[in-house]
């Protein structure tokens, strides 16, 4: 099915199952179908929704750069919920989708039952902020000039992607094929409008410190530019847990689907039981050992 956003963009949506809703938001290198291991697992007990972001077929591909931004990405997620008449949902996002999930918690916390922020960090580290913007613009140019069919062969072998290829060549080949089918213009505009212009998560510390939505942050221990940001989110968001996957790169939900699903299932169960709460104030991070 398709839903229409406030600015008239049609987004392709798929759903499966019944129960408490879960909305899955995909990464730059993926699409709606990259959530298939989670759609199959969680639709047994939940109403699972996934969608193609603007700029990704079969959704519309606006040609105006100003129709792409981090804020718009969150508004699109809200438009999907509104189009399906869903008041609240668990929000799960990877990488670009993880950033959208984090911002969802800041912009519309009343619509989120929980947040799962996976593989989020690129461009957030202050020392790499300008470098990331430059690389994003270079990636955009490559998608636009060389095309996804050709450039995906390079992009898909990034430093945090080769772990997936080494563990699961067939799974990585499916990821690579999905990446090669990106729309050239849509990928370029997404890089320029969303990735290159989004604010650093470190600039939002005060807002995250006030956000009370139950949150799970996940990262791979070889996804180097996400590790420190994940620790920062854990320390800043009041009701936040952190899971670090060993010997794992960026594409968490596909590289380690069983572990991802296990941790997500336990998190959702605790949230729905009211057991995922703020950190106990007795767990003082400044204390090494108690002596009195």
Image: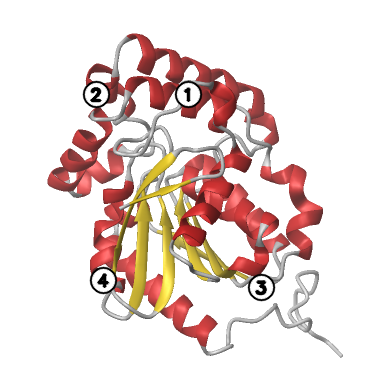
Residue 53 visible, this angle? no
* Chain-order first, disc 2 or disc 3: 2
Q: Where is residue 145 in the image (x, y as percent from the top left)?
A: 35, 9
Where does label 3 land, which residue? 239
Tag in front: 3 or 4: 4
* Chain-order first, disc 2 or disc 4: 4
Q: In this view, does 189 lie to the left or right of 156?
A: right
Q: Is mark 1 on a helix, strand or loop?
A: helix
Q: In this view, does 61 lie to the left or right of 65?
A: left
Q: What element carries label 3?
A: loop
* Chain-order first, disc 2 or disc 1: 2
Where does label 4 land, which residue? 41
Where does label 2 land, which residue? 153
Where does label 1 land, which residue? 189
| Residue drawn at 78 percent across, 84 percent down | 282
Q: Do the residues labelled 2 and 1 touch (CB within 8 Å)?
A: no
Q: Is mark 4 on a helix, strand or loop?
A: helix
Q: Position of residue 216 (x, y in %)?
A: 54, 66
Q: Position of residue 109 (x, y in %)?
A: 66, 64
* Chain-order first, disc 3 or disc 4: 4
Tag in front: 3 or 1: 1
| Crowd rating for badge 4 (residues with CA inside 10 Å; few <14, some 14–19, many 20+) | some
Q: Position of residue 279 (x, y in %)?
A: 70, 78
Q: In this view, does 185 lie above or below 26?
A: above
| Crowd rating for badge 2 (residues with CA inside 10 Å; few <14, some 14–19, many 20+) | some
Could you give the CA–CA distance between mark 4 and mark 1, rounded to whole angstroms? 33 Å
| Residue drawn at 64 percent across, 60 percent down | 105
Q: Residue furthest top?
A: 145
């Amino acid at each position: 099915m398709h839903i229409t956003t406030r600015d008239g963009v049609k987004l392709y949506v798929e759903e499966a199952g019944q129960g408490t809703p879960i909305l899955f938001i995909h990464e730059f290198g993926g699409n709606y179908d990259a959530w298939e291991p989670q759609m199959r697992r969680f639709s047994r007990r939940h109403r699972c929704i996934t969608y193609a972001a603007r700029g990704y077929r079969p959704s519309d591909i606006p040609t105006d750069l100003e129709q792409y931004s981090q804020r718009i990405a969150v508004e699109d997620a809200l438009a999907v919920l509104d189009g399906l008449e869903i008041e609240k949902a668990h929000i799960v996002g990877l990488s670009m989708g993880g950033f959208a999930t984090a911002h969802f918690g800041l912009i519309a916390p009343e619509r989120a039952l929980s947040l799962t922020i996976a593989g989020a960090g690129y461009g957030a580290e202050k020392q790499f902020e300008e470098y990331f913007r430059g690389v994003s613009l270079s990636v955009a140019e490559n998608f636009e000039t060389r095309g996804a069919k050709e450039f995906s062969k390079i992009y898909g072998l990034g430093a945090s992607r080769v772990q997936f290829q080494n563990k699961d060549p067939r799974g990585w080949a499916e990821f690579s094929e999905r990446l090669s089918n990106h729309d050239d213009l849509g990928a370029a505009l997404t890089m320029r409008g969303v990735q290159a212009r989004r604010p650093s998560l470190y600039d939002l510390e005060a807002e995250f410190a006030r956000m009370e939505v139950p949150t799970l942050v996940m990262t791979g221990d070889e996804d180097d530019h996400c590790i420190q940001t994940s620790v920062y989110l854990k320390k800043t968001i009041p009701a936040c847990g952190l899971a670090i996957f060993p010997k794992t790169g960026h594409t968490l939900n596909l590289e380690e689907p069983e572990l991802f699903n296990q941790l997500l299932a336990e998190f959702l169960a605790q949230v729905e039981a009211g057991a995922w709460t703020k950190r106990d104030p007795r767990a003082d991070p400044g204390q090494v050992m108690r002596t009195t």
